[in-house]
């Protein structure tokens, strides 16, 4: 066994030890569904210029959303209640002191203006001109400042930074074009005054208070000013103060002034039983997956299973290290990424089996090394396309969708480390033993497997029936679209809004009993939480008064006398802008996948893959329409994941098609080679699919209502994606190849030798 293998093994142990320390010492941020948090209700107060209409309240809500994001609060919920109220839920805020601080930071009006300084003044002095102001400054004196010259909306960004060679924190401000020009003008005018003159200062005012009044630097020339469209607010700021100020400035002025009328702490939206059931489902799914991999790939399968265990540690350490918020859908995202790790290992093992069958005398270690090298491009391509989808979820999504994008990204990165580094080291150690080399069947790489042997013997010609397969897909699409058109989509409360009802009961009732009562009333998908201002808060879709009475009656059956403490209409937490962003995310995902595959393969490959992706998503949406399953934020996360699953399968097949084509003879037919490639990848597809299905099936059966629909969507997406990669994307590619053929010559960069000067002799 080589020294290099042992060195890599020790490095892997060091990595896992570091992750274990991080996991033990850093507490995770838990979402509203797992831990609960603070809930605020703000009432918007309008003016003659800006009335408190639903439209203006929605604009204010968007500013608040940016402000909450700037404060680093992930997985938050913000919705409009009725005409002029805004509901804000923040996870992890579990005591009154934290709640009050968060309320103050979120609801501050934060009107920022910039003024020229006229002179120093006495504290009780009157302004010398009508629009001037006399204000106390941050430096302890009192200044008379002129009218506003730069408004807050002319500021495009603000961030807390430490400049090079400085330990002080400053707030860096960026202006738009007009604001930048004005800043250059007023700092140029101020620079014409001598040092120490108050007129050389500029006043930055936040909510009627001078927060900074710096003197223009002596290096700034008279009438030249500070140009470049940016500046720093200086002061003796702590890191927290600088970040809070930057968040307020970044959030901008609220269109409407807000008054906090309610604040309370709420319990988790999921019960302990649901959480425990979901964790149990994940563990069972992992055990079944590990057992399946060991049965199929024996010794190297055992090493891969151990690497999967390290994946869980890696992913968790990355999550807590980055300060991400952990939610139940996020947990599902991690479990799903295990499928990606399995896929990478299966690709490597299948390639290694082929190599050992071709060159048994070269040994198992060489076969394994070649397997990793040959599977590398397919692994990278499939994971990059999934990361593209996850990145779009993060940048264009909100709330649980954004959080799912983060956890899926972390999971994919962790799965690649697990599969390509840890599993490789462990497998290398396993096959380096002499007893294993004497009996290669123990390793799991000694033969190509029963599925591949059967396929090689039967040699099915899938592409000969390509028109039939495409016809089946077309019929399925028609059925799905018909369901969407005739049945409609059962949009969840995130899209439609609904009612939030607060109840108190006269007898002691557990939260689980309350959830059961609400479900018995006909609303199993309602969110039921504890609260410190009422016994229970129930959030559901649009319901009539008669339906609301049913909820009261069921609660009365278990809790005695029921008092309705509050009843509010709530808006859609995924408002029009966020819904549009979700649709944009899908469109951009398709374009990004198309562009990436066009660069890595050819545009015909990209088009075929994107059409297959769209086919898979439409079929799952159509199935949910026919079954009247809810389309909510979690479903959107599932749909985006299906995009990743679909392209993952297709890329593996296309990678083998490309390899076969570049290594073919002039007389070889593309359709025949594509058929051969599709057949060769079926063992990988079957084994990866079964491995992932164990996890998803466990989540669907045991994960409770919270994850059941999510798991069903992914199960259907996995099955449909597996079908479409072989029976739709590949046949479609063969048709496109006939019209727009891929060259047989692989484009490679030719490097000039040192002796080659490039001169022509």
Image (cartoon, helix red, strand yellow):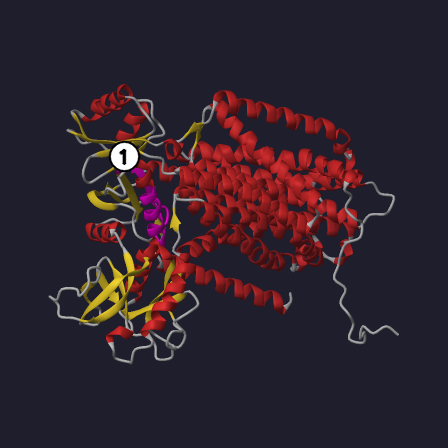
Please identify the quadrant where the C terminus is shown.
Answer: bottom right
Helix, strand or loop under label 1 = loop
At a point 46% along the width and 39% down the height, the residue shown is 580
> Is residue 230 one of those drawn in magenta?
no
Residue sitting at x 13%, y 70%: 122
Indicate the position of residue 511 as horizontal and vertical percent values.
26, 34
Residue bearing the label numbered 1: 83
125 lies left or right of 461: left
Q: Is residue 284 above or below residue 365?
A: above
Query: Which quadrant holds the N terminus?
Result: bottom right
Spot occupied by residue 668 in the image (x, y as percentages of width and height): 84, 43
Q: Residue 550: where, in percent of width, then height?
A: 26, 20
Along the viewing direction, whichever of 331 and 295 lies nearer the viewer: 331
Q: Is residue 451 visible?
A: yes
Q: Which residues are magenta?
A: 59-84
Q: Foreground residue, 415 or 452?
A: 415
Q: Report the label total.
A: 1
Q: Residue at x 42, y 34 (%)?
A: 632
Image quarter of residue 554: top left
Choose between 124 and 295: the one closer to the eye: 124
Which quarter of the picture shows residue 166?
Answer: bottom left
Horizontal relation, residue 82 to residue 477: left or right: left
Front residue of 528/55: it is: 55
Q: Residue at x 61, y 48 (%)?
A: 382
Hey, which residue is sitting farthest left in the picture? 124
Above or below, 220 against 650 in this view is below
Q: Dot 1, crowdedness within 10 Å: few (<14), some or many (≥20)?
A: some
Q: Compared with residue 642, is residue 101 higher up or lower down, i.e. above or below? A: below
Magenta stretch encompasses residue 63: yes
The extreme front residue here reads 129
Q: Is residue 287 visible?
A: no
How far from the left and from the top, in percent, is residue 724?
64, 34
């Amino acid at each position: 066994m080589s020294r290099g293998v042992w060195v890599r093994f020790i490095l892997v142990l060091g990595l896992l030890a570091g992750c274990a320390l991080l996991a033990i010492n850093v507490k995770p941020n838990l979402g509203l569904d797992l831990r609960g948090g603070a809930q605020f209700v703000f009432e918007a107060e309008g003016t003659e210029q800006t009335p408190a209409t639903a439209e203006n309240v929605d604009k204010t809500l968007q500013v608040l959303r940016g402000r909450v994001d700037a404060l680093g609060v992930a997985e938050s919920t913000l919705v409009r209640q009725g005409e002029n109220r805004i509901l804000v839920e923040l996870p992890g805020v579990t005591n009154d002191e934290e709640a009050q601080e968060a309320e103050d930071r979120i609801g501050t009006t934060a009107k920022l203006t910039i003024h020229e300084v006229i002179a120093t003044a006495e504290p009780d002095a009157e302004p010398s001109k009508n629009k001037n102001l006399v204000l106390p400054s941050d430096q302890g004196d009192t200044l008379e400042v002129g009218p506003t010259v730069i408004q807050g909306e002319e500021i495009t960004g603000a961030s807390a930074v430490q400049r090079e060679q400085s330990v002080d924190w400053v707030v860096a401000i960026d202006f738009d074009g007009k604001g930048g020009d004005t800043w250059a003008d007023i700092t140029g005018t101020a620079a014409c005054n001598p040092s120490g003159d108050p007129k050389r200062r500029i006043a930055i005012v936040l909510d009627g208070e001078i927060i900074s009044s710096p003197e223009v630097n002596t290096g700034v020339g008279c009438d030249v000013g500070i140009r470049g469209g940016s500046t720093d607010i200086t002061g003796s700021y702590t890191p927290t103060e600088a970040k809070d100020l930057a968040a307020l400035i970044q959030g901008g002025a609220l269109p409407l002034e807000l008054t906090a009328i309610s604040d309370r702490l709420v319990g988790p939206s999921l019960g302990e039983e649901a959480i425990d059931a979901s964790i149990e489902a994940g563990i069972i799914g992992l055990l079944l997956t590990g057992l399946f991999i060991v049965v199929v790939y024996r010794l190297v399968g055992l090493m891969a299973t151990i690497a999967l265990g390290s994946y869980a540690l890696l992913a968790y350490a990355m999550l807590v290290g980055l300060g991400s918020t952990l939610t139940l859908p996020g947990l599902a995202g991690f479990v799903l990424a295990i499928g990606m790790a399995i896929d990478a290992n299966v690709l490597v093992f299948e390639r290694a089996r082929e190599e050992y069958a071709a060159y048994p005398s070269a040994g198992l270690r060489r076969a394994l090394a070649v397997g990793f090298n040959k599977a590398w491009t397919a692994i990278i391509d499939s994971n990059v396309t999934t990361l593209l989808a996850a990145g779009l979820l993060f940048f264009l999504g909100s709330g649980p969708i954004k959080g799912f994008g983060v956890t899926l990204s972390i999971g994919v990165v962790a799965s690649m480390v697990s599969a390509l580094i840890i599993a490789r080291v462990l497998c290398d150690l396993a096959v380096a033993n002499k007893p294993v080399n004497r009996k290669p069947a123990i390793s799991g790489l000694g033969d190509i497997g029963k599925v591949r042997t059967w396929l090689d013997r039967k040699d099915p010609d899938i592409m000969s029936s390509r028109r039939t397969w495409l016809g089946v897909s077309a019929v399925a699409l028609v059925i799905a679209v018909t369901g969407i058109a005739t049945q409609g989509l059962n949009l969840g409360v995130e899209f439609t809004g609904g009612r939030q009802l607060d109840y108190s009961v006269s007898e002691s009732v557990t939260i689980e009993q309350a959830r059961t009562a609400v479900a018995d009333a006909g609303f199993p998908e309602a969110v039921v939480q504890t609260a410190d201002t009422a016994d229970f808060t129930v959030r559901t879709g649009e319901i009539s008064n008669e339906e609301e009475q049913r909820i009261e009656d069921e609660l009365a059956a278990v809790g005695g006398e029921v008092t309705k403490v509050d009843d509010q209409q709530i808006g859609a937490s995924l408002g029009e802008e966020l819904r549009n962003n979700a649709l944009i995310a899908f469109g951009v995902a398709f374009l990004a996948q198309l562009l990436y595959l066009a660069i890595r393969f050819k545009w015909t490959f990209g088009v075929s893959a994107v059409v297959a992706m769209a086919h898979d998503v439409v079929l799952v949406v159509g199935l949910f329409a026919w079954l009247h399953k809810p389309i909510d934020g979690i479903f959107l996360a599932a749909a985006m994941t299906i995009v990743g699953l679909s392209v993952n399968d297709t890329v593996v097949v296309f990678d083998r098609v490309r390899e076969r084509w570049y290594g073919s003879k002039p007389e070889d037919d593309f359709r025949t080679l594509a058929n051969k490639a599709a057949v060769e990848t079926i063992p990988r597809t079957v084994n990866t699919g079964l491995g992932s299905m164990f996890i998803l099936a466990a989540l669907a059966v045991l994960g409770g209502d919270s994850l059941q629909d999510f798991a069903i969507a992914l199960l259907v997406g996995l099955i449909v994606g597996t079908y479409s990669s072989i029976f739709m994307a590949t046949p479609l590619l063969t048709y496109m190849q006939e019209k727009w053929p891929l060259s047989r010559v692989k484009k490679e960069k030719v490097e000039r030798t040192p002796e080659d000067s490039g001169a022509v002799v």
